[in-house]
Amino acid sequence: MFEVGDTVCYPLHGIGTIQSIEKTEVLGRIETCYLIHLHNTRMTAMLPVETAESLGLRKTITPKECEKLFEYFKTAEPCIGNSNWNQRYRENMDKLKTGDPKGIVDVILCLGKRNTMRPLSSGEGKMLSNAKSILFTEIATVLNIGIDEVETRFK
């Protein structure tokens, strides 16, 4: 269970801070929910405590894990992915939905490689931008550095 003030990562939305834990009525049931202020979008999300883990809510990564991601990015072979854009999009979306930072790096590598071969579709371009935003914001927050510095380390 998370506590008020914890910085967490919510898949597809990025990092946020737990503002409060409240009891609220959801579909006729009283649920205990996390109220999370999301940093990227400045929105507030409400997630039931009971399902937060299955939705992928997790603590942010550690500085050591950030360094491992930088190393993984440098050494991993970018997959080109499925030639069918629809299937490739679903595979990449599945990786993003897990919230696993290594999976997000895989999406960045895959789409980045495809983008050098030919321009991405608007959907895949948006996905690449979103993946970078989510991951780079988390790393910048954890390491207390600017997004520009994170972007430089991922080149």
Image (tube, rainbow, N blue to C red):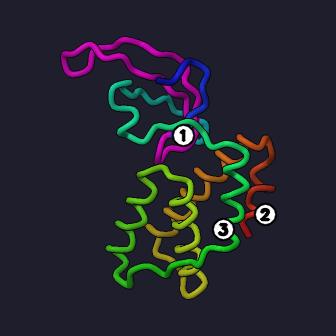
- Kindly check if marks 1 and 3 are in contact, taking CB atoms under 8 A apart as contact: no
Q: Is residue 30 magenta?
A: yes
Judging from the image, what secondary structure is the residue with disc 3 in? helix
Q: Residues within 10 Å of mark 1 (few under 14, many from 20)?
A: many
Frontmost residue, 153 versus 86: 153
Q: Residue at x 18, y 16 (%)?
A: 28
> Mark 1 and mark 3: span between their CA atoms?
20 Å
* Residue 142 image point, x, y percent: 71, 41
Q: Residue at x 58, y 39 (%)?
A: 15
Q: Which mark is residue 152?
A: 2
Image: 17 above or below 97: above
Judging from the image, what secondary structure is the residue with disc 1 in? strand
The disc, 1 or 3, on the residue closer to the chain's N-terminal end is 1
Q: Residues within 10 Å of mark 3 (few under 14, many from 20)?
A: some
Q: Is residue 95 magenta?
A: no
The disc, 2 or 1, on the residue closer to the chain's N-terminal end is 1
From the image, tell me which residue sits under label 1.
9
- Kindly check if marks 2 and 1 are in contact, taking CB atoms under 8 A apart as contact: no
* Residue 140 image point, x, y percent: 73, 46
From the image, tell me which residue sits under label 3.
73
> Mark 2 and mark 3: span between their CA atoms?
12 Å
> Which residues make up the magenta segment?
10-38
* Residue kind at label 2, given as amino acid type: Thr
Q: Which mark is residue 84?
A: none
Is residue 153 found left or right of 105 in the rendered image? right
Q: Quadrant location of residue 131?
A: bottom right
